[in-house]
Image (tube, rainbow, N blue to C red):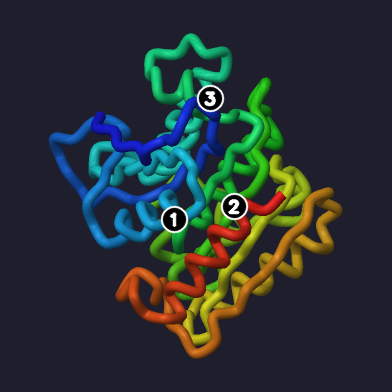
Amino acid sequence: MSQDYASVQGQASEPFLQSLHGQPPLESYGQTSWYVGNLEEANKTLLVAEAIVIAVSVKYGLFSERPKLACYEDSWVALKYVVSHVNGDGPEPWFNDYVDFDRVFIGGDSAKGNIAHNLAVRVGTDGLPEVKLVRVIMVHPFFGGTADDQMWLYMCPKNSGLNDPKMRPGKEYLARLGCERMLIFVAEKDHLFVLGKRYYEGLKKSGWGGNVEIVVNLGEVHCFHLLDLKYEKAMDLIKKYVSFLIKE
């Protein structure tokens, strides 16, 4: 397990952001890890610097000896590991000294947006004592309703079919979200565009007590913001992401 943190000025506690990212198949790799170094991580590093948060990137396992549903469990275990520091007596001094557990955020792009949603549902169902999940951010999230469904069903053989709530959450699951606010980005030329908008509309009608906002990236493709961090619309997305994290 490797770790990297943004610098913290002074002794004030800062919000915590759990950011999600997949890991390519590695036969010899057997645990959740934290990573830094590729373009997606450069994007998150920029977010951390702008929002002044302590961020942990969870590189969940995709190796062949484990079921792909491990991505959900790995991300939950990672979140609980950080939360175990809430009383200031955990194994990692940075979390003990600097994390404000009343301001916890979860974010993810694409399939990781789906995992972010499922983590928020699990927080709402199982709870995280003494911790407040304030906001969730999903960028171009994957949900059921395209040809990708068959791939998900194949990779996650322990499923309940096309209406599996992890892939296609119904009203009762949306209402369980354990966060106060959610921001959803959808890209106009993304094949997941309609699904993201459907999720947004379903969430508004679910009875969930929080507030949800949607941003449409006009003329853009799936996860375009990771292709060029200096692209004007990518910078606009990051600015919106940051403003959502820091606003009261």
For the N terminus, the quadrant is top left
- Residue at the spot of label 1: 47
Categorize mark 2 by other alpha carbons within 10 Å: few (<14), some (14-19), many (20+): many
Q: Is residue 177 left or right of residue 88?
A: right
| Residue 167 location (% of width, % of height) | 56, 57
User: On screen, 175 above or below 128?
Assistant: below
The residue drawn where x is 37% and y is 46% is 68
Q: Is residue 227 visible?
A: yes
In the rendered image, the residue lying farthest to the left is 28
Q: Is residue 196 left or right of residue 10?
A: right
Q: Quick one: SS at disc 1?
A: helix
Q: Is residue 156 visible?
A: no
Q: Is residue 162 left or right of residue 197?
A: left
Frontmost residue, 168 versus 76: 76
Q: Quick one: SS at disc 2?
A: helix
| Residue 29 location (% of width, % of height) | 19, 35
Upstream in the sequence, badge 2 or badge 3?
3
CA–CA distance in space, label 2 to label 1 = 10 Å
Upstream in the sequence, badge 2 or badge 1?
1
Looking at the rendered structure, which numbered label has been put on residue 83?
3
Residue type marked 3: Val
* Dot 2 and dot 1 residues touching (CB under 8 Å): yes
In the rendered image, the residue lying farthest to the front is 10
CA–CA distance in space, label 3 to label 1 = 21 Å
Residue type marked 1: Leu
The part of the image, by quadrant, that contains residue 128 is top right
Categorize mark 3 by other alpha carbons within 10 Å: few (<14), some (14-19), many (20+): many
The residue drawn where x is 24% and y is 32% is 2
- Residue at the spot of label 2: 245
| Residue 26 location (% of width, % of height) | 17, 43
